[in-house]
Amino acid sequence: MNPYRVKPETKVRLDDLPTRSDGGIEKADGKAQLAQLSVQLSDLQELLYAEHKQKVLIVLQGMDTSGKDSTIRHVFGEVNPQGTKVFNFKQPTPKELDHDYLWRVHQNTPGKGEIVIFNRSHYEDVLVVRVHDLVAKSVWEKRYDQINAFERLLAQEGTTILKFCLHISKEEQAERFLARLDQPSKRWKFNPGDLEEREYWQDYMDAYEDMVNRTSTDWAPWYVIPSDQKWYRNLVIAETIVKKLENLDMQFPKEVPDIEKYRGILEEMVAEESQ
């Protein structure tokens, strides 16, 4: 069992969970392992796409600078984009607001053979909405059960769901904001509004804690990943995904009957083209 997985029906306190860990691994060794896992993930994604039966949904949720973009870049950098999609749920459009809050989410869930990554997700509707009092408590309080039911539907219809909460410290966030100012190529990512959001840090921690405790299920578990060290965060997430995909027991489709008889035809074509 992954030590960072939140077991259903248990209660965790985010303050008790580490934001920094190396798992007893040297950084160089961890990066080498990640490189190997990236190749394995690429092969597994190709198998998933070829088999065209299973669906995989990856949810990345975390505070600003926790590394959602970086995780996608480093963990999924080797996979074929043909079978992998990333969706980022920003402020709802007027059309989306005319529907229930899960309407826009359901449209972007994976089809057969696809890996879909949510960079932020439907959980914004029990996080930002809650912290900033955008809807009444009586509204967002119901959403935990609604989300569990929604994810159960996806799982019953063949979707494997893995949810990663990128857990960073307030101190590390401040250092990463500062690092953005120190690198001209990163300054575009800095938003003064992010500093205003830091004033709500404890409110967000309370909201994240309830999110994890109330929506980590057998069919859609949460993993609270120590994310102060980027390389270790990437390693744990990659390893978790690879192990899960390996357990799906995927198979390539059956080959064309009597496939060897086509070898001679193709060899003749190659010979003709080389003349």
Image: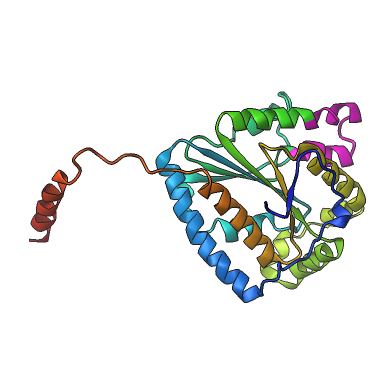
In percent of width and height, residue 242 lies at 55, 53
On the question of residue 224 being in view, the answer is: yes
Q: Nearer the viewer, residue 73 or 191?
A: 73
In the rendered image, residue 151, in percent from the top left (x then y), is placed at: 67, 32
Q: Residue furthest front?
A: 1
- In the rendering, at what x and y percent does residue 48 appear? 46, 44
Residue 173 belongs to the span the image colors magenta: no
Q: Main secondary structure of the magenta part?
A: helix
Residue visible at 90% across and 30% down?
137
- Determine whether, in the image, residue 123 is placed left or right of residue 55: right
Read off the magenta span: 123-144
Toward which corner of the image does residue 88 lie, by quadrant?
top right
Drawn side of residue 122 relative to residue 267, left or right: right
Q: As rendered, which of 70 and 51 lies closer to the eye? A: 51
In terms of depth relative to the viewer, which is nearer, 44 or 60? 44
Image quarter of residue 209 = top right
Give the quadrant of residue 258.
Answer: top left
Does residue 104 show up?
A: no
Compared with 223, 98 (above or below) is above
